[in-house]
Amino acid sequence: PTCLVFTEMHVTFNFSLLFVGKLNVLYIIADDLRPTLGCYSDPVVKSPNIDLLASKSTVFFNAYAQQAVCGPSRTSFLTSRRPDTTKLYDFNSYWRVSAGNYTTLPQYFKSNGYITMSVGKVFHPGIASNHTDDYPYSWSVPPYHPPSFSYEKRKVCKDKDGTLHSNLLCSVNVSEMPLGTLPDLENTAEAIRLLKSMKDLGNPFFLAVGFYKPHIPFRIPQEYLKLYPIENMTLAPDPEVPKKLPEVAYNPWTDIRKREDVQALNISFPYGPIPKDFQLRIRQHYFASVSYVDAQVGKILQALEDLDLAKQTIVVFTSDHGWALGEHGEWAKYSNFDVATRVPLVVYAPGMTWPLQEDRMFSYVDVFNSAAEQPAEAYGVHGMVELVDVFPTVASLAGLPPPRRCPFPSFQVELCTEGFSLASLLDRHLRPTSHHAYAHSQYPRPSDSIRPDSDLPALADIRIMGYSLRSSDYRYTLWVGFDPKTFRANMTDVHAGELYFLAEDPGEDHNLCNICGNVNIYLASFLVHCVMCH
């Protein structure tokens, strides 16, 4: 078998030639956002601003992260290399030192004359980005971090008795917060300030805006909870741990357990469960956090429009990975399931995904105004795509030469991609005949049994790697031995397998690998072939 059936349709014109000068790029990244959005047919979440963007964009309905945790995913999609190439599975190494001097997406634009700017959480902070957010390699100016973020993990959540705690659920009166604001409000204001500064500069820009929500803690303005009355909340459709789920595949949501309000519940390790009333409140706060982020996106798009930049700016909206909301008895990310690996990916290319003749592209939509007009249905692509595809796609749309495909191995190659440009899939008037057959994700574990560090093992403690293939028909995951010293997986050392046929089991609840028998050996060879050819 071959693991790719992708033939890129070459678009015969340079998109940037539609305009005088180069297209700008606005790259918006949410944190821990699964596709719980109106434009992804979610029946609960209110996301009118992202839905408006989607109505003028191409929406990729099956986009997947390469590892469902912040640092490895962000390093992966910003370099267009998979975790086995960046050698980052935790937060504790910098790819330029530990793997190779890989060129990043903003660095590539910077080298082509763009002013590159970072607001909020774009790279994962700390060691993973050299404590500088990869400045000055990737950015023309020092990245911006909102001052109020320093209070994110402090005791600022007011309980009913007025005492302050470090909670998971933390809806707040913003005026009572330290500095009288919240990080994503500051991110929005800074992004708008930078857009205004770029207006008359005459230089193309690449502006990346990383919102901190809906990442925990759910420290958000309290008014957003009103959008989701608790009596309207429901549990996940599959809240029980699947009976045939291998232990190695389970995520014990250790980070959630560290919050004071969760500790007070005295939940057993590793499976819990969380009391049902608290589950409903988690889901309520997550949805409210999504609407809060949506409002910030709307304000930035409104500024882009008001500054007459909307018709000269590519807009990408995505997330670093998803987040489980009680499915399989799990919470947070840290797994290979769809709820953890699937992300929104919305790409707006002026004059391509939407005609330029329209007077206004974007206007802010107040989520609290129930009379807001519904945007047109988005144009969607349902084939498998990956976050490593974003780098070559944005480069192609901006009229820059897309990076060449990486050889194997590519540790010594500074500029290449392990993804594909999706530019030819954006135009609804073109009919590409093929696309990715599979999306690949992976997740490390320290042991077959569940440990407190199963969610996020340090590199030295990784003993097993779960490699996962997602096609339109099935998800197949193989958990195999892994040597953290050589960064090599032993595909013959099979610890467990998972196989889900999605037509009958869209929630990935019924593992069929107990009846696979020797087919695991064949699938293992198939999987390693696919990883190699990527």
Image (cartoon, helix red, strand yellow):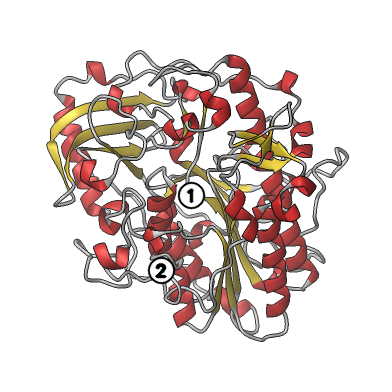
Element type where label 1 sits in the image:
loop
Q: Quadrant of residue 37?
A: top right
Q: Position of residue 343 (x, y in %)?
A: 51, 44
Residue 488 in the image: above or below residue 98: above
Q: Position of residue 124 (x, y in %)?
A: 45, 56
Q: Can you say which quadrant of the picture contains the N terminus? A: top left
Question: In the rendered view, does 404 fall on the left or right side of 9?
Answer: left
The answer to whether marks 2 and 1 mark residues whose Cβ atoms lie closer than 8 Å is no
Q: Position of residue 531 (x, y in %)?
A: 24, 48
Q: Amino acid at mark 1?
A: Asp
Residue 329 in the image: above or below residue 467: above
Q: Can you say which quadrant of the picture contains the C terminus? A: bottom left
Question: Which residue is located at x 47 percent, y 18 percent?
Answer: 267
**In the image as oriented, which residue stretches furthest toward the bottom?**
202
Task: Mark 2: give few (<14), some (14-19) or many (20+) Cα within 10 Å.
Answer: many
Q: Nearer the viewer, residue 129 or 410?
A: 129
Reading the chain from its start, which is encountered first: label 2 or label 1? 2
Q: Nearer the viewer, residue 364 or 149?
A: 149
Between the residue at mark 2 and the residue at mark 1, the CA separation in whole angstroms equals 16 Å
Q: Nearer the viewer, residue 423 or 494?
A: 494
Question: In the rendered view, does 282 fall on the left or right side of 82?
Answer: right
Q: Position of residue 188 (x, y in %)?
A: 69, 60
Q: Which residue is mark 2?
A: 104
**In the image as oriented, which residue stretches furthest toward the left?**
492
Q: Which residue is mark 1?
A: 320
Residue 437 seen in this snapshot: yes
Q: Amino acid at mark 2?
A: Thr
Question: Which residue is located at x 73 percent, y 26 percent?
Answer: 160
Residue 52 seen in this snapshot: no
Task: Mark 1: give few (<14), some (14-19) or many (20+) Cα within 10 Å.
Answer: many
Question: In the rendered view, does 273 fall on the left or right side of 482?
Answer: right
Q: Quadrant of residue 47?
A: top right
